[in-house]
Amino acid sequence: MLTQPAIEQLKSLRCMGMAEALREQLQTPESASLSFEERLAFLIERELLLREQRVVLGKLRHARLREQACIEDIDYKASRGLSKMLINQLALCHWINHKENVLITGATGTGKTYLACALAHKACRMRIGARYIRLPKLFQTIDIAKADGSYTKLLEQIAKTPLLVLDDWGVAPMTDANRRDFLELIDDRYKCSSTLITSQLPVALWHDSIGDATLGDAILDRLIHNAHRIELTGDSMRKNKTQKVEKKEN
């Protein structure tokens, strides 16, 4: 029989989905009743599905999301102040295609990082590149890049990322170098890519947190005017989850 060589040839062509589908057809007697065109269509469909899964997994690996979050698992209870309509709109990722930003604020534990990662996860599922990083870690990475000569390359890589998720704005004061590096980064991305920022600080306090009026104006002008804002409220979700676990154990 020529089927085994055909399977190996498909593998050599890196058509793993087709190879596996062909093997399954050979092991399923019912497949013999299908026409050649139908069997071929099943092989092609499996190959396309596998390749799509590989692309998505690659996007997710590159994104390095902190939370294993999905849009479908978001809690919309009233006390959070979270609009399901807005999230469903953002889940379509048109805002990324239009190079718009998202700003998520709220007290610690209200689910800012989870929501940010859920939106980034959905972008990856739609084959849109994303990258998550805490803002303090970003500044550390930039300092290292300056020291080893890869600063320009790093900024170019960040500028090209369709969706950049910057977590924890305002947890530490910016140095003058931080402010200037951040302006350079945001300016490179302005009207070219989308940025999602989370912060415990209300957006109204971001200007003061930057620490320089002129640079603050320039940075926020590029972030805010085309941004969707989400203000989370309510008690700490982490605290609530801990209390629920303790009640179950007792």
Image (spheres, rainbow, N blue to C red):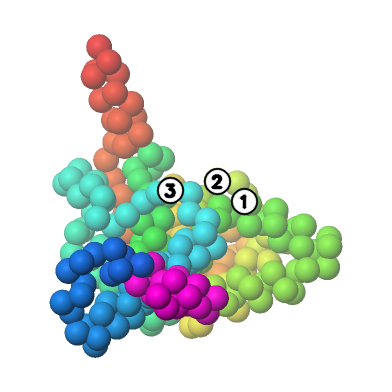
Number of dots carrying numbers: 3
Mark earlier in primary sequence (3, 2): 3
Mark earlier in primary sequence (1, 3): 3
Q: In the image, what residue occupies the spot 17% across and 69% down?
A: 30
Query: Considering only vertical position in the picture, is 244 above or below 14?
Result: above
In the picture, which quadrant includes the C terminus?
Answer: top left
Viewer-nearest residue: 179 or 240: 240
Query: Tag 3: residue type?
Result: Glu
Label number found at residue 171: 2
Query: Is 77 left, or right, of 41 in this rendering?
Result: left
Query: Is 30 left, or right, of 109 in this rendering?
Result: left
- The stretch of residues the image draws in magenta is 1-22
Question: Does the stretch in magenta take in 20?
Answer: yes
State the CA–CA distance, disc 3 to disc 2: 19 Å
Magenta residues: mostly which secondary structure?
A: helix
Residue 199, how many percent across, how many down?
Answer: 45, 52
Secondary structure at badge 2 equals: loop
- Label pair 1/2, CB-CB below 8 angstroms: yes
Q: Closer to us: mark 3 or mark 2?
A: 3
- Label pair 1/3, CB-CB below 8 angstroms: no
Residue 214, how many percent across, how many down?
Answer: 61, 70
Q: Which residue is mark 1?
A: 136
Query: Tag 1: residue type?
Result: Pro
Which residue extends farthest top?
Answer: 250
Viewer-nearest residue: 243 or 168: 243
Q: Which residue is mark 3?
A: 67
Secondary structure at badge 3 equals: loop
In the picture, which quadrant includes the N terminus?
Answer: bottom left
Question: Does the stretch in magenta take in 91?
Answer: no
Q: In the image, what residue occupies the spot 18% across and 64% down?
A: 85
